Amino acid sequence: MPGKGVPKPVTGSRAPELKINVVIPQPDKATKERQIWVDSLRILLYSGIVGEIGVGRESFKAFSEVAHEIADFLSQGSTDIRENKKLPHGDNKDNATRVVEQATSEKEHRSIATMRPILLQGHERSLTQVKFNAEGDLIFSVAKDHVVNAWYSHNGERLGTYNGHNGAIWTVDVNRTSTLVVSGSADNTLKLWDAKTGRCIKTWEFPTAVKRAEFNEDGSLLLCVTEQRMGYLGTTKVFEIVNDVDAEQSDEPIISIPSRESKATVAGWSYLSNYIIMGHEDGSVSQWDWKNEERLNIVQAHEKGFVITDLQFSPDRTYFITSSKDKTAKILDTNTLQVLKTFTTDTPLNSAALTPTKDFVIVGGGQEARDVTTTSQRQGKFEARFYHKIFEDEIGRVRGHFGPLNTVAVHPAGTAYASGGEDGYVRLHHFDPSYFDFNIAY
């Protein structure tokens, strides 16, 4: 298990499926059993479960009336439900069951449509980044609380923690074989971990905080972006990595690329590790021949003066998406840096991700955290927003966070996505069948 003194695993909270089947006890049933049915029906009605899951109003009203009548008669010791003149004539047991089944059917349909999340509760402060591993069975999350968490993606159970940082952790990544994990922190260190045991393999120290770290496709190279502060330039460094948890790792980077104009805030590897793509504080995107430390291209992708907050690649790394505080997300070509698509929102964006199996884009952001206390959830725009990648139209939103979304990540197989918010929670959504059935005719 990663880390010594690992906290007791925290199981993600998934709302249980509700299947109701009203059965009327026979006249010879004991009073105790009758009371159990009475209590069960009333708990169901008064707990708010039925209303909370979105059952249709008319069906819920009908179900409520029938269930109350059944409960009242059972509590009075009645043995013949037909004594109640308020209920419709005929087979009232079948009628009650039919109404309940109708309500349950509507409930199941709507609960699928809202993709009830698994809530991952393992951080005490706001999330900064969430990452799936290559297989998609693990999720790694970091926040401003000094801890890296590892989770099972299928049920939200916490696998363990990686302890060792002394400051907010800004970034996390895992190599393709899920054997090495890297994290960068405000304590000015970059740490390499044994993913299985939680042992810290290597620590690199820098003059300033590490804001972004990423392995290349085969895990042989690792880049990190350091902050510009206290007279130090922000720098993108590349380290050679040995994919062996027992191997000695190099102390010095093989390449250092300082940001002399606008500092880099995010960076990533292109296909075949040919280029390093950087997003900058002034809204520009640059392409680097990292081996020769030469800048090949730079474009003003976003509105000047608005920081680029995230950069994520497509599965084949031939194009990528950026998000910015200018309230847009943009898809750019890796080779030419041409802006291919623009997705416009009404809120500053902190993260954007591409779905691998559908033509969708997921973006997240929201009102600044300092203003949240005077703003409702709806006004703060704390939703994950889905856009059609081709037509650039918004097609849906998923609410849930009680603060801005700071990070969004999509399962490598496109079956789920996770979002981390200022509220300290990771919300994991597994897509329902209707998501995969949704198509727009071209």
Image: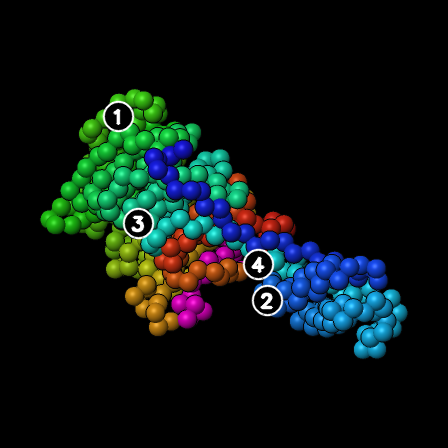
> N-terminal of the two: label 2 or label 3?
2
Between marks 4 and 2, how big is the CA–CA gap?
A: 17 Å
Q: Is residue 400 visible?
A: yes
Residue hosting label 1: 249
Q: Residue furthest right?
A: 90
Which picture quadrant has residue 191? top left
Above or below 37: residue 168: above
Q: Which mark is residue 145?
A: 3
Between marks 1 and 2, how big is the CA–CA gap?
A: 56 Å
Task: Report the amino acid beneath label 3.
Answer: Asp
> N-terminal of the two: label 1 or label 2?
2
Q: What kind of element bears circle 2?
A: loop
Task: Report the amino acid beneath label 2.
Answer: Gly
- Mark 4 in CB contact with mark 1 (< 8 angstroms): no
Check disc 2: other Cα within 10 Å, few if <14, some if 14-19, many if 20+.
Answer: few
Residue hosting label 2: 48
The answer to whether residue 28 is left or right of residue 305 is: right
Between marks 2 and 3, how big is the CA–CA gap?
A: 34 Å
Check disc 4: other Cα within 10 Å, few if <14, some if 14-19, many if 20+.
Answer: some
Residue 201 location (% of width, % of height) = 29, 29
**Residue at point 53% right, 44% down?**
155
- Mark 4 in CB contact with mark 2 (< 8 angstroms): no
Residue 338 location (% of width, % of height) = 37, 48
**Residue at point 77% right, 59% down?**
30
Q: Quadrant of the N terminus?
A: top left
**Residue at point 19% right, 29% down?**
252
